[in-house]
Amino acid sequence: MSATERPARRRLDAARLERAVDGFARLRLLVVGDVVLDEYLWGDVDRVSPEAPVPVVHVTRDGVALGGAGNVVRNVVALGARCAFCSVVGDDGAGRRVIDLLKDLGVDPAGVVVVEGRPTTRKTRVVARTQQIVRFDRETEEPIARAASRRLVEAIGRAIPEADGVVLEDYGKGALAPHVLAAAMRRFRDAGLFVAVDPKSVLAPFRGASLVKPNLREAESLSGLRVRTRADLARAAERIRRRIGGGAVAITRGSDGIALFSGGLDAADAREGLDVRTARREVFDVQGAGDTTIAALVLALRAGASWLEAAVIANAAAGVVVGKTGTATASAEELKAALPAAVAAAEAGLAARRAGDAPIAPRRRAPAAGARRKA
């Protein structure tokens, strides 16, 4: 029986979870989706401009990082696994920088399709004393043309034979065009691959996926239901499961952790959902935490963890990155160090549920681990 079919283990063992993390090194994931070049300008503010009522940022340093689906790649590699990446960039300086950053990670950029005349998505953030002041976006949301689609599907096909699982990251920037998804999902199904999806606004093209991981806002949008009670959350998850053909749903709920709905759980938990609480952390930046969550969740499942164990591991990984500034990653060693607190939080949540005093409604608060809004 595979990890994704096995009922969730209710007794958590940190040593067993560590062994699953060690197993990441044996895995190779295929990540497909919209890549973003994240640019940063860091500095200090000590005065207001005399030209307009805006702060003057004295820039002290700058930097770039892979964002969007590229941040999932960064997290897969940081967690110790190998990664293949298929995406689209423009024939411009930003696109060339994306390719260089992939090479720096040890990821072959052969799966990145260069499209002449199409801009590479860039997000430039100005940060003063850890506070983001403004962001400049340069991008297009137009689906890629047929010729580029064919090249991208060919690249996906070349990567499939060595993949242990797939992560589809939809940031709505056009790489996952309908004709790309139709062909890719067919190939994944034929290869029998585990497919996890981080969706933006639609589900139909992802029918047949093994797992969908929306955050709470996305779950409301994808299901068309307002979530105000725990029963609402279960109904939203069930609607999402039906729309993808019965796969699992993992709804990230910020500092409340992950709500799991899967046939791999006990019957009652599959229907009502299993809340996996996360340890409280001091939060510096939630940016990219969802990318960390899906990378850790899929790696844990493919390494043999149960759904409950995988959710605990994902919570721990996300907790590491929200304690950092900027688009961050969690290493395997950092993840292991965070596991005891994550296990304790999850067990406390399960005990509270058995005692009948678990929260009955998703609590609305600032997003934390595992939460991020796609933009």
Image: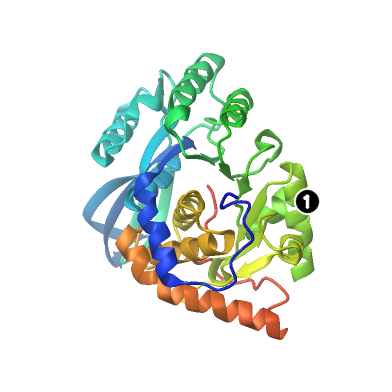
Q: Amino acid at mark 1?
A: Arg
Residue at 70% x, 54% y: name it: 263
Element marked by disc 1? helix
Residue 287: x and y in percent read 44, 57
Residue 167: x and y in percent read 51, 41
Residue at 32% x, 65% y: name it: 334
Left or right: where 16 falls relative to 46: right
List the residue tagged with mark 1: 239
Q: Kindly tell me whether residue 152 is visible in this rendering.
A: yes
Task: Classify 209 as above or below 88.
Answer: below
Residue at 58% x, 59% y: name it: 307
Task: Classify 344 as above or below 362.
Answer: below
Residue 218: x and y in percent read 65, 53
Color scheme of the displayed model: rainbow
Residue 317 picture quarter: bottom left
Residue at 73% x, 76% y: name it: 360
